[in-house]
Image (cartoon, rainbow, N blue to C red):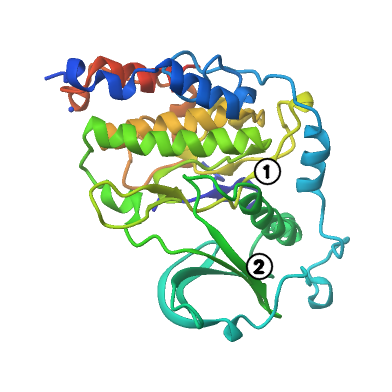
Amino acid sequence: MLPVIDVSQGVCGGGSSHGGSRLAPVFRANAAARAAVQSQASLAGRSAPVAVAGARGRTCGRGAAGCASAAAALASPLAAASGDCLSRQILEFGYDKHIEDKYEWGHELGKGGNGVVRVVVDRQTGERLACKAMPKELPPDVAESKRRGHADAIKREVEVMRRLAGSLAVVRLVDVFEDDDNVYIVQELCGGGELHHRIGDRHYSERTVASYMRAVLRTLAQCHSHRILHRDIKPGNFMLLDNSERSPLKAIDFGLAVPFDPEALPRSDLGLEGTPWFMAPEVLSSQVVPASDLWSAGVMAHQLLTGRLPFDDHKSPSSPSISAIWRSVLCDRVNYGAPWWRGISEDAKDFVEGLLNR
């Protein structure tokens, strides 16, 4: 799995015949798609922010009424948080207690930087769900700045998922619980597995990629319409709902999502957090805008179509240097004449090129 990095923790110290006529409609924008997306994501800074392969906008449109107050509410710190505050007595988020009263624990599904995910079963209905257990306190070896902001980050992730409730491309939030040690986010179970596990050295058909990217861009349209920057779009943060051939794709992780005020862009106070291969050039200068998410979506589309990342440490891909990856992001251009693009339609190439427009 590609890592999420935080420079404050010292991680980066030191250093595929064209099917155009048949597949073109999959990637080609149409009026209905433009209208649907524009109604949800007009703030992304593009005439058709997420449905077309046109130039990736660098600015954000000016806001709708109430966006500042919405951003303030999403950004507000925990009422109990203060100063050097990760002491036990102040880590009460106000969520329900006693998760065991409602759910029975099942087997572990996975473990990552954000906690452990297990199956839970609703004791009344028998529904199988996924539960992510997130520790309230980070270990001492984590940077103090990250430890200090961890409580707010948990609260913010829950609030983002609540705001995005009802989006077809976002995993359904069911419940939130807490105990003395953890916050438990209960959500729908995606039995098809993580998208990145299916990539390897292979690539997907254009039709499949188009389906997946519609879900990704729908997620971003929802995020941006709610004045939320996702900041970590990548295959590892999406899962397939089931194992069927036409399984829906669901966004599952909003751990780096933050609010934005359209009148105060770019956000320059976020530091260098994210997954290096997917970070937009402007993010490396701490200038984060909604279009930065679209760049990440372009990297994801490139990887799904070709099985390769467009930006990497090309000299040492098996043991990459963060600085080399970032140099690639800043300086390299995608070579659409490379062998791995052979057989991919011009429409698909235009789609990726539009999202990766500097």
Q: Looking at the image, is 195 positioned above or below residue 112?
A: above
Q: Residue at x 66, y 48 (%)?
A: 163
Alpha carbons under labels 1 and 2: distance apart: 20 Å
Give the quadrant of residue 215. Answer: top left
Residue drawn at x 76%, y 31% as measured from the top left: 261
Element type at marker 1? strand
Residue count near mark 2 (Cα–Cα under 10 Å), binned few <14, some 14–19, many ≥20:
some
Which residue was labeled with disc 2? 138
Which residue of the protein is positioned furthest toward the left in this rendering? Answer: 17
Q: Are marks 1 and 2 in contact (CB under 8 Å)?
A: no
- Please indicate, yes or no, whether residue 89 appears anywhere in the rendered image: yes
Q: Earlier in the sequence, mark 1 or mark 2?
A: 2
Mark 1 surroundings within 10 Å by alpha-carbon count, few (fewer than 14), some (14 through 19), many (20 or more): many
Whether residue 323 appears in this view of the structure is no
Instruction: Using the rendered view, name the quadrant where residue 97 is placed.
Output: bottom right
Amino acid on which disc 2 is placed: Leu
Q: What is the total number of numbered labels drawn onto the structure image?
A: 2
- Indicate which label's residue lies in the foreground, 1 or 2: 1
What is the x, y in percent for residue 105?
A: 48, 82
Residue pictured at 54% horizontal, 45% vertical: 12
Say what amino acid the circle numbered 1 marks. Answer: Val
Q: Nearer the viewer, residue 8 or 298?
A: 298
* Above or below for 51 versus 98: above
**Numbered mark located on residue 302 in the image:** none
Q: Which residue is mark 1?
A: 258
Q: State the image coordinates of residue 265 (x, y, percent, origin top left).
A: 73, 26
Coordinates of residue 74 in the picture (x, y in percent): 76, 47
Q: Secondary structure at mark 2?
A: loop
